[in-house]
Image (cartoon, rainbow, N blue to C red):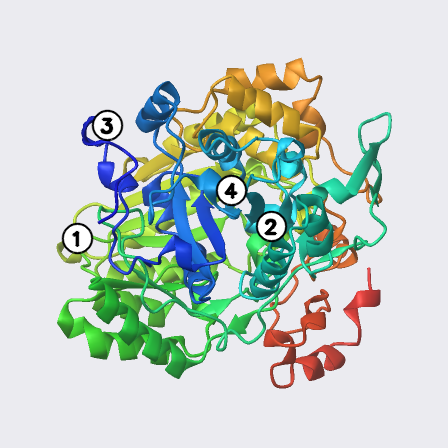
Amino acid sequence: MRKLALTDDILLSVDKPARYIGGEINMRVKDPKDVDIRFCLCFPDVYEIGMSHLGLQILYDILNSREDTYCERVYSPWVDLDKIMREKNIPLFALESQDPVKNFDFLGITIQYEMCYTNILQVLELSQIPIFSKDRSEDDPIVIGGGPCTYNPEPIADFFDFFYIGEGETVYNDILDLYKEYKHQGKSRREFLEAVSQIEGIYVPLLYDVEYNDDFTIKSFKKNYEAAPERIKRQVAMDINDSYHPTRPLVPLIKITQDRVVLEIQRGCIRGCRFCQAGMIYRPNRERDLEYLKKCAYEMLESTGHEEISLSSLSSSDYSKLKDLVYFLIDEFGSKGVNISLPSLRIDAFSLDVMGKVQDVRKSSITFAPEAGTQRLRDVINKGLTEEDILSGASEAFLSGWNRVKLYFMMGLPTETEEDIEGIAVLADKIAREYYKIPKDQRQGKANIVVSTSFFVPKPFTPFQWARMDTPREYIKKQQLLRSKINEQLNRKSIVYNWHEAELSELEGVLARGDRRLCKVIYDAYKAGCIYDSWSEFFDYDKWVKAFNDNGVSISFYTSRERNEDEIFPWDFIDAGVSKAFLLREYKRAKQGTVTPNCRMLCYNCGAKAFGGGVCFENNNENKNAAAGGNYEGQN
């Protein structure tokens, strides 16, 4: 029987002690003495969030499939346990063996969003691992970063030994084989890092130096180790039918954010929304085989006992076999009490028919994401959704029995005007009017239109990476304008308005496009007590502002200025597939309000074709490109 790292009195004194004891269904158990490599996977947020992440489950199974490797997990301790561990000097531990993380060979941290950066430092410090990579000894774990935030790793470069750029199924075995070889030969940490930099997709920050201009833009980004690659090429699993999908995922002991089986049906997206980083960095779109997905669904539901299965995708409606898969799941599992969750659907007749079969209409809501209130601005962001689409979808939903609609918008998008903001209120009212067209005796009570606005945050590897970002004052002014416009609408009593915090969005914008000068800012903010910044109850804007001021770093430099076309970005050394030239042309098309068709309609040579598969090579896609007039790569 395992000995727990925490005593009973500590466990009984903290919220949700099951976060820290391990022992979940399908947890892997190995004897640490029987393996050569010990690897600890970390999600730097609370257990309930981390356990909901499919990518961590995939890596957990991939690494544990190696006989020479034992992969375990760690999550950020909640604030109550954090305080106790510091007071009692208890080192952070892995859930499986309950052994201290500092005794492992690797600590692999998945970085899903910028606002977890201070939690990364929390994990390192509680693990008693030096926070800065330059201070680590031969006995400390190698700290690896992975996930979408590694597409600009520079704001946290000083804390990691190396970053893995791309999808985890590709070169992890090469990394571990190399480490095993170097470990047995007694070679140094530095020698291993130099050697691992030769594996495609690996970025070792200490092998590169940054030089700045007087205005703090980047003058040069150069390697200081001759053998280091000039550019880091993103790793992509092209045949995702051969890549790993966990069929025995971990089952938590407590309720988590996404308490269900997750079935990944495809990767990438064909849509090309200009604000969406995931739609760009996960190109090309690649589908999983229908029969493979049926098999996975059976095995996952059987091995977990879950009563819900969610289809994971950036745009589920674009999966070519969606109808066949959904009706199969309904026929096979609907009568067994298994609910089917269908996120990321475009609301059309098929989607509504499916949702009517798998949801309790009286308790559910329909979600639309128009993103912008006017057609002009939806064209700017390349949303590919017309007002007619939105209103007809809402009407179909109301006629099918729904009376609650959630609408998601962004404010602060490039070229936005007051008319665009007012358009959000007008569109919400038009949707409510669709509901009240239904005869009163056939309605399900009053319409409930929930309008939610977030603030646009420009991200690397999107056409909007050059764009300025609104200040919190500008955001708040726009919130107030929208609220007043909603109050002017005929159906204002049917409309509820929710909004995101402006200051939190501003900091996310800084961290998203920041450079290495932010490492010290993040460190100082953390040492001042900043932690769980994505949780509004813990976010402390004033402490962050002080950290920026103390380091002489300007927030507005990163947020409130338009980038020059020829500016060197902190992430330009990464080859993500989509070219900078393509992104710039898309930015120019956005300013012109010109729509770019989706990848199945026309190939615009974004660069992802170089990966050699996916939607880029579907039947007659290239013929459509030729018929459209040749090579977009040479057009402006």
Q: Which residue is mark 2?
A: 376
Q: Give the class, few, some or many, for how many residues have Cα within 10 Å of label 3's Cα (few <14, many ≥20).
A: few
Report the Cα–Cα distance between label 3 and label 1. Answer: 50 Å
- Secondary element type, mark 2: helix
Q: Amino acid at mark 2?
A: Arg
Q: Are marks 2 and 1 in contact (CB under 8 Å)?
A: no
In the picture of the structure, the residue carrying the numbered disc 1 is 444
Q: CA distance from mark 4 to mark 1?
A: 39 Å
Q: Earlier in the sequence, mark 2 or mark 4?
A: 4
- Which callout, 2 or 1, points at the residue further toward the start of the chain? 2
Mark closer to the chain start, 4 or 3:
3
Q: Nearer the viewer, residue 567 or 376?
A: 567
Q: Amino acid at mark 3?
A: Ile
Say which quarter of the image contains residue 220: top right
Determine which residue is flagged by label 3: 10
Q: Nearer the viewer, residue 100 or 460?
A: 100
Tag shown at residue 113: 4
Residue 218 visible: yes
Q: Residues within 10 Å of mark 2 (few under 14, many from 20)?
A: some
Q: Nearer the viewer, mark 2 or mark 4?
A: 4
Q: Nearer the viewer, residue 190 or 243?
A: 190
Please report whichever mark, 2 or 3, sits nearer to the chain's N-terminal start.
Answer: 3
Measured in 3D between alpha carbons, the distance from the residue under mark 4 to the one under mark 3, in whole angstroms, is 30 Å
